[in-house]
């Protein structure tokens, strides 16, 4: 129980710190608060439930994720119209610290590119429903899409997915991307995607 408490404090601090980088941005703050609530539910379930809710209910293999959806989904008329976005991501398997490292790249129809690395936490609600708060940092190439003020961008978000018995997942993810005010301009954007996750066994 003590080890779980220490890990929970560290994970909650990491998620709230990722939200704080965007200061008063409503989307980032909302994601941070939602992530903390989801994490809290997972910690409580890990400690007191009958195993249906928790942080480590299902062991997870490494996985590839393919996603598609909308870029700049919450338009504010300060930049180009929303456009299509695609994502390819690799997620490492679950471990005793619950953090799953991830590496990925996103590209839009308007030729923007975002390459990133970060981590996620899987919180299981029963056997087949998973909420995954996540945070990342990466390099942004504008292309013909919105100027986000800096090549260095921070991404926070949450994925809600159904986990099939074979480990595959089908989910919806919402993310906020911003430079955390390290540049003079910080417009930020939001993305909404449908993600399909394919588990792989990298040990074979």
Image (cartoon, helix red, strand yellow):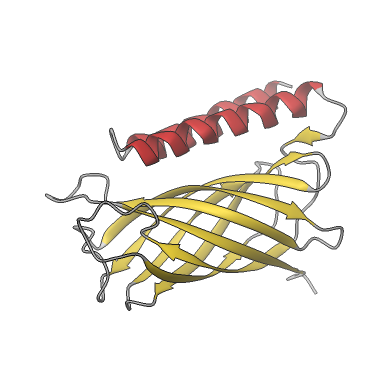
Q: Is residue 104 left or right of residue 61?
A: left
Image vertical order of residue 26 relative to residue 136, above or below: above
The x, y position of residue 102, in whole percent, is 55, 59
Tell which residue pokes out farthest to the left in this image.
184
Residue in the foreground of this view, choosing between 76 and 157: 76
Q: Is residue 151 left or right of residue 113?
A: left
Q: Is residue 109 left or right of residue 194?
A: left
Q: Looking at the image, which residue is at 38% across and 77% down?
A: 109
Residue 16 position by quadrant:
top left
Residue in the foreground of this view, choosing between 137 and 73: 73
The x, y position of residue 176, in whole percent, is 40, 50
Q: Looking at the image, which residue is at 69% across and 63% down?
A: 62
The x, y position of residue 126, in whole percent, is 81, 39
Residue in the foreground of this view, choosing between 68 and 181: 68
Residue in the foreground of this view, choosing between 77 and 133: 77
The x, y position of residue 101, in whole percent, is 57, 55
Image vertical order of residue 79 relative to residue 145, above or below: above
Q: Looking at the image, which residue is at 43% across and 57% down?
A: 191
Figure label count = 0
Q: Quadrant of the C terminus?
A: bottom right
Image vertical order of residue 103 relative to residue 32, above or below: below
Q: Quadrant of the N terminus?
A: top right
Q: Looking at the image, which residue is at 43% across and 35% down?
A: 30
């Amino acid at each position: 129980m003590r080890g779980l408490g220490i890990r929970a404090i560290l994970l909650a601090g990491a998620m709230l710190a990722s939200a704080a980088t965007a200061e008063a941005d409503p989307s980032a703050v909302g994601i941070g608060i939602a992530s903390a609530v989801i994490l809290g539910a997972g910690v409580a379930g890990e400690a007191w439930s009958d195993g249906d809710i928790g942080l480590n209910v299902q062991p997870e293999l490494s996985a590839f994720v393919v996603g598609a959806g909308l870029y700049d989904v919450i338009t504010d008329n300060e930049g180009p119209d929303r456009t299509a976005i695609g994502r390819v991501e690799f997620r490492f398997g679950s471990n005793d610290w619950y953090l799953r490292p991830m590496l990925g790249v996103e590209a839009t129809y308007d030729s923007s590119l975002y390459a990133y690395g970060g981590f996620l936490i899987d919180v299981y609600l029963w056997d087949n429903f998973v909420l995954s708060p996540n945070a990342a940092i990466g390099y942004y190439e504008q292309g013909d899409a919105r100027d986000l003020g800096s090549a260095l961008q921070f991404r926070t978000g949450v994925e809600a997915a159904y986990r099939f018995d074979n480990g595959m997942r089908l989910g919806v993810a919402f993310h906020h991307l911003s430079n955390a005010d390290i540049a003079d301009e910080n417009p930020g954007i939001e993305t909404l995607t449908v993600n399909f996750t394919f588990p792989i066994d990298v040990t074979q």
